[in-house]
Amino acid sequence: MENRFEVVIVGSGPAGLSAAGRAAELGLSHLLLESTTHLANTIQRYQKGKHVMAEPGLLPLRSSLPFDAGSREDILAVWLKNAKKLGIKVGWNADVTAISGQRGDFVLQTRSGKSVRAKHVVLAIGLQGNPRKLGVPGEDQPFVQYQLDDPDEYQNEEIMVVGAGDSAIENALALARQNKVSLINRRDEFARAKEGNLSLLEDAIERGRIRVFFNSSLRSIEVQGNGEHRAQVSLSTGEGEVQVPVDRIIARLGAIPPRDFVESCGIQFPNKSTNAVPELTHQYESNVPGLYVIGALAGYPLIKQAMNQGYEVIEHILGRDIKPVDHGLLAKKFSGLPFGLDVEQTLEKIKNNVLCFGPVNSLRFRELILESEVHMPKAGEVIFSRNDYTNSFYSVVEGSVEVEIDEQTGKRVTIGEGQFFGEMGLISGRRRNATVYAGRYCVLVETPRRTMLRLLSSVDEVRRRIDQVFILRAIHSQFAPNANLEDLADLVNSAELRQYAPGEVLFAEGESGDELHLVRRGSLTVSRYLQGREVVLSYVPAGKYVGEMGLLGNSRRTASVRAVVPTETVVMKSEPFLALLERDPKLKAQVQTQLQARLRANASMESSSEGGELLSFLMRQGLGEATDVLLIDESLCVRCDNCETACASTHGGTSRLNREAGPSYASIHVPTSCRHCEHPHCMKDCPPDAISRNASGEVVIADNCIGCGNCESNCPYGVIQMAPIGGSQPGLWSRVLFGAEHKKVKAKDAPKRAVKCDMCANLKGGPACVRACPTGAAVRISPEQFIELVRED
Amino acid sequence: MHGSFLSHRGGFWFWFALVLVLASVVAYVWHEPIGLPNGGTWLGYTLGTIAALLIVWLTLFGVRKRAYYSRIGSVKGWLSAHVYLGGSLLVVGTLHSGFQFGLNIHTLAWLLMVLVIVSGFYGGWVYWRYPNRITRNRDGMTRDLIFREIADIDRKASLIVEGLGSPADRMVISAIQLFQVGGGVWQQLGGRDRSRMMISEVRKKQKSWKRVSNSHQQRLLDELTGLLSRSTDPKEAALLQELIDLVSRKARLVKQLLKDIRLQGLMEIWLYCHIPLTLALLATLTAHIVSVFFYW
């Protein structure tokens, strides 16, 4: 195989295949080296029939091979057909072990001892060949696996699955059918997992089929020669060290760049982090001239991005000046900016100016800007208003904005260049707590919630920087709007963030403690033991605080506080807080007044135990995460179903609420209807990003819904349905005189779309269900009104 | 937060209607017509016009209730006004007649009006009292849940009888097949359980099957407890006991279901008088007005 090619491409995944396709199309002498006997091994190893997405949707595809969202089988078949048509030359079973040389004369060695010469080399080997190891002694034992091909291969074994992602959960669930499975999670929750997987896991845990160790990590793996099981794993858990016998360990910890091999080719990495990707030029060239890196190894994990790079890298090798495929989109976005810079320079400027984007790599940043909007508001223009429900995130690239933090006094603070705002709405999922006005000559970048959440979950440094500012601003606005930021330094530095799972206790009645919790996400209940029963006394939503009594001197907790939904609090220590109170007697009086109001409210709840029961009932229905909920008073409801008819009539014939379904307590009935969660579960996994929250708070599904049903299965409250599109609506008089009903589309395979309550966002006058109720039984209220409701009953 | 239509806006329409009634009565007492009070005096015409407009407006409630895009008040407000103004119509309409009744179209119109209002009063009463009764009877269940649980009990029972043989199997299966709820209006409102079952009977030394009432599953329970008391096989006894437990549960659910159907029926039935009577009233009212002006 001694031969010299213009370009040799290593790896036949989406990136490599696309590069080879472009080379073949241009008639360039090329060779695609693939270590297995088929193209795109990673995609081949996806589970059967897996639906492959074509994200990011905004990005056009630039490749000699087609690609569109579809099943794994369809995509592979299309690629194979086109690879043949284009005449791509492939070297099979060619596992490259070494690359040496430089531009014009590279030599690639394969495991079988063959060598190939090339003028240029494109490295497109991805990450999947290099799973992250356990990092403890014994990690390379034969019974330790980093991949699970067929779960049914194993029976009656003690299997330990390590990892907190979807692949770990899916493996554990599949293995639990025939084995005893334990699942090891380093953290205290499965934050990255899909909702659907989570509920299956919860079910499996409840049935005792999977045992989960939270806050745990492996210490060592000891092989046992003649024991009942193959090995003994020692785990360090929150409650100390635990020994677990195992026959097999499946570690699903993601993949990392195959650093040793890449470095052996002479390519340098910017730092020691295991996730680090090689530093590359805009032409994807590494520090070794003539050696290019594309695809997941270059930090582009998505298929479409990788394919585009494959195409572009060949163009670069040929010395053609080709702009990145998103260049046009960005140029349009940046048109009208007063910087007088080109696209690349503008990107650079934004990245350098905005502090929290500093740690983002430039490829991811490009994508972030692509999904964001650039605004140049006039001075004084309102960016968003207090009580809006919008949840996007703003960064100030140039100029400044003014935040009105006190409605009464109109007091404003300035947020200058490089700072950001809007993080409160993003994190808490609640209404905006201030109105923001544009300053002079300001340039803002508005990043959508979904993009920001993805960034926060993947770049820890960004999360850290935003959290830091969040704590400062939360304390400032909540306790000391008039204090200087410097005065708060002690308090802010001693504050920390804590996460709580649903049902977890922050502190219990009778304990001693002096911490104050400011809820920044989720909600809490305050309860007390009265006559041997726990009675819920109040509900604390995001933006409010609990535990101030401990701070004010009484360190014995008089009530228990529990998280209703996944909750995050800013925890403040007593000393710096007391110091702040000493300095500001007005604040002290204010905190005391609020405490008294709470104690009074608690006392009045205690006197009616029925109210407490009703409140806990509402919390059990998941209303702790609601922002607006439909409640029916059954002592007024005459079951006429005019609410449902009104809903159906104003929404294409499908009622989005089911009056009768759902539980009741003390004549308060919670019908099956959307409660517009603070952090909507339905939004989590919507491929076309069709679900959003309006400024007035309604969570709505837009017309670009593709009918995939993800939201329907992700909603824990069963309020989303898939309804056929179309049908006809009878007029008012035919309904009044002849009782005519909406005609639905009957065909079984008629296209369907997800539908749910939109709170009649398009109807003047508000929700049709409530307005159509003749007896006053139906009301929509927000959780803040629960206490009022409970007292009234 | 929740508030009944009866106390809508602090009972605004109640006071409005009361003022209308008092004003009409005062005017009627104060007025001294030539001859007997009748619809032909200026006060008669005034009251008649008010009453006719009220009738037309009250009828429009059926339209407003279905006009889901309308923003003219709320349906609850309309119902509140409908109830109280409807009540005041009884006084206004009757004073308009000047108590001159006879066998004619005019009195027929008055009579129909009274019937509509009386049926409406009944409606107001059931809307006020029945929702609570229904809720208490449902006890956290929905009708759908009750039906599903009954279906589940039936399924379990038919599995158990497979191990019992005659005559228990035929009795239990027939009781399931001949179980009946709902039906026509009277059956729904009566709330009687007309379920039946088959029992075996020996007549002239010949065994035959006979259909008997199984109201509230009582007959089936009697038969099963009879079988259990005579049973000598512990396995059979265990199965019978299990059956008895299931059928007892079903009996309780049936009772709940029948009461629910009955209560809901009583809460809705009046509309089947109120609406047709209203249409009849509108027709007669037209005839009354046309004839009055024709013979003027």
Image (cartoon, rainbow, N blue to C red):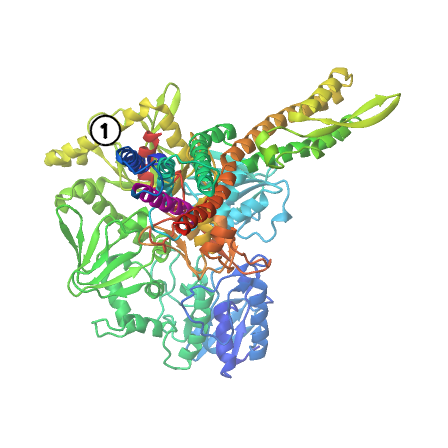
Disc 1 secondary structure class: helix
Using the image as rendered, state which of residue A694 and residue B118 is in the foreground.
B118
Relative horizontal placement of residue A153, taking residue A677 as reference (left or right): right
Image location (x, y in percent) of residue B105: 47, 43
Q: Quadrant of the N terminus of chain A?
A: bottom right
Residue depicted at 39% across the width and 57% down the height: A275
Image location (x, y in percent) of residue A148: 57, 51
- The 10 Å Cα crowd at callout 1, few under 14, some 14 to 19, many 20 or more, is many
Q: Quadrant of the C terminus of chain A?
A: top left
Q: Is residue B61 magenta?
A: yes
Residue depicted at 59% across the width and 26% down the height: B252
Q: Amino acid at mark 1?
A: Met
Q: Is residue B24 magenta?
A: no
Q: Give the prevailing secondary structure in the magenta stretch.
A: helix
| Numbered disc total | 1
Q: Is residue A305 above or below residue B103?
A: below
Using the image as rendered, state which of residue A496 and residue B274 is in the foreground.
B274
Q: Is residue A283 above or below residue A250?
A: below
Return the residue found at the far front.
Answer: B35
Relative horizontal placement of residue A54, taking residue A481 as reference (left or right): right
- Magenta span of residues: B43-63
Relative horizontal placement of residue A508, taking residue A702 as reference (left or right): left
Using the image as rendered, state which of residue A212 and residue A130 is in the foreground.
A212
Name the residue tied to disc 1: A549
